[in-house]
Image (cartoon, rainbow, N blue to C red):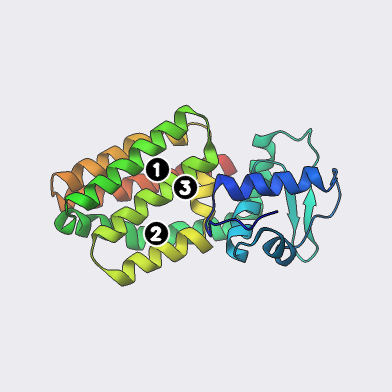
Amino acid sequence: MKPLKTVRLSDQVIEALKEVIARDGFGPGDKFYSENELTGKLGVSRSSIREAVRILEVTGIVTVKHGKGIFIADPVRKELEAFKEWLKTNETSIFEHFEVRLMIDPKAAGVAAAKADDDDIREMEKACCDFNAQFNDHNTPAMIKCDEEFHLAMARSTKNRTLYYLMKTMTSSLPEGWITSLHIPGRSEKTIEEHKAILKAIQERDSSAAEKAMKSHLNNALADIRASLE
């Protein structure tokens, strides 16, 4: 198999892992290759493999047993059931993710409203349009990537390199928040409207409204996650 060119979560990495499962004859209950082995086979970074494996775990294709490895899941297990199980296992890291983002993202949105140039706004508009298109195609992994791109474009528009690289690190290495919220039924539709509100405030150069809209977006997502756990 030729090395993949991407180093981020993408449909290409996910589909490649599915291909390896089918091609190499793995069945339910079998132990899958380790992250290091998959890194060598696919020619991508370990963080890319880890992120793709998380998506496959959420959708019920594999299960990750800490200290033991990656295993092929039972195909009769429904995606929603797999997601709920994953959510409970990753509860602490998910809440920590949102705790940090509530410290950073609202202020970043406010700064973006003051500093974003026309190119920045076009990038955010594109991310929103791409998210809508993937929503219409029912492609959750692609929606997760578009969600990340929206927040990255917003961080980039602040003209603060430290903030941008912090957000980039969170999207590539700590993606639990994006993975979690967009697998909850109804959250994608809410995200579309909430992103529109954030973008509108930035377009209108209203820092206060942008900060408020971002805080509402994150709190709403967190409330939906808590409700799913209950």
Query: Which residue is pictured at 14% across the width and 49% down the height?
Result: 206
Identify the element where label 1 is drawn: helix
- Pointer 3 residue: 145
Quadrant where the C terminus lies? top right
Q: Which callout, 3 or 1, points at the residue further toward the start of the chain?
A: 3
Task: Give the residue at the far bottom of this rendering.
Answer: 162
Q: Nearer the viewer, mark 2 or mark 1?
A: 2
Q: Which callout, 2 or 1, points at the residue further toward the start of the chain?
A: 2
Q: Which mark is residue 220?
A: 1
Residue 191 visible in this rendered orientation of the protein: no
Q: Amino acid at mark 1?
A: Asn
- Pointer 2 residue: 101
Cα–Cα span, label 2 and label 3? 17 Å
Q: Amino acid at mark 3?
A: Lys
Q: From what the image shows, is residue 155 above or below residue 25?
A: below
Q: Which callout, 2 or 3, points at the residue further toward the start of the chain?
A: 2
Task: Confirm or deny contact between disc 2 and disc 1 (CB under 8 A).
Answer: no
Query: Which residue is pictured at 64% across the width and 42% down the height?
Result: 83
Query: Which residue is pictured at 46% across the width and 34% down the height?
Result: 134
Cα–Cα span, label 3 and label 1? 20 Å
Give the class, few, some or many, for how many residues have Cα within 10 Å of label 3's Cα (few <14, many ≥20).
Answer: many
